[in-house]
Image: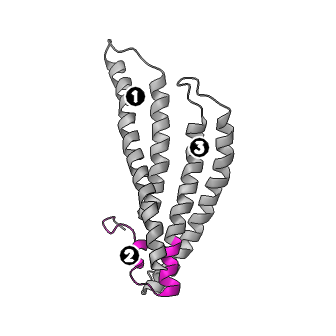
Amino acid sequence: MVSFLHAIQFILNGYFRILQVLVTVLMGLMIVPVSLQIFSRYTGFIPRYIWTEEAARFCFIWIILLGATIAVREGTHFEVDVLPTPRTAKGEAFARLLVYFFMLIFTLVFVANGYAYALFGYNQTSELTGINMIFIHGVYLLSGISWLIFLGERILWACAVLFWGNKEAISHLRGDHNVAR
């Protein structure tokens, strides 16, 4: 079972790396329209472009949703301790499965509604940039599917602890230890 989990982890690491690079590129791209907005506002030699606000907003939407996807994979979303802290690895795996169940409900809402929202955006075009809106509306579906995949990975690691007693797998569930909890 652990070798299967490592094979899945290897594939998902590649997808995860693509998401990280994409967020980094989008942050760099967002600097261009925002800088144009600032310079055009305070200088007279740069015209006031209307498309810059929309382009910055589109980049920001992608950065937020892909950043949330990265946080699901890393286990770095903020946590609120509602349940008592488990004393054993199996107790922690069970508590995390409970949390993942509620995250899964939210994720399925994003997938179902993200699909409808992407279809809605398919027939629309942005007036200012001319971009087909599926590129904006579709990120909700992409994020939902990515959350589903990464939650599936985390659920498999929790099951490895809970049902097969794999103590090493608990480190995959705890997320980044450098994040304040």
Q: Along the polypeptide, which appears first: circle 3 or circle 1?
A: 1
> How many other residues sit within 10 Å of disc 3, few (<14), some (14-19) or many (≥20)?
many
What's under tag 1, amino acid-wise? Pro
Q: Which of 6 and 130 is in front in this view?
A: 6
Q: Along the polypeptide, which appears first: circle 2 or circle 1?
A: 1
Q: Distance between the residues labelled 3 and 1?
A: 22 Å
Q: Where is residue 73 in the image (x, y as percent from the top left)?
A: 45, 62
Query: Tag count in the figure?
Result: 3
Which residue range is magenta in the image?
Answer: 155-179
**Residue, far top:** 45
Position of the C terminus by quadrant: bottom left
Residue 138 badge: 3
Of helix, strand and loop, which one carries label 3?
A: helix
Q: Along the polypeptide, which appears first: circle 2 or circle 3?
A: 3
Asked if residue 159 lies in the magenta stretch, the reply is yes
Height in image: 78 above or below 26? below
What's under tag 3, amino acid-wise? Gly
Tell us which disc is closer to us: 2 or 1.
2
Height in image: 51 above or below 29? above
Residue corresponding to mark 2: 171
Of helix, strand and loop, which one carries label 1?
A: helix
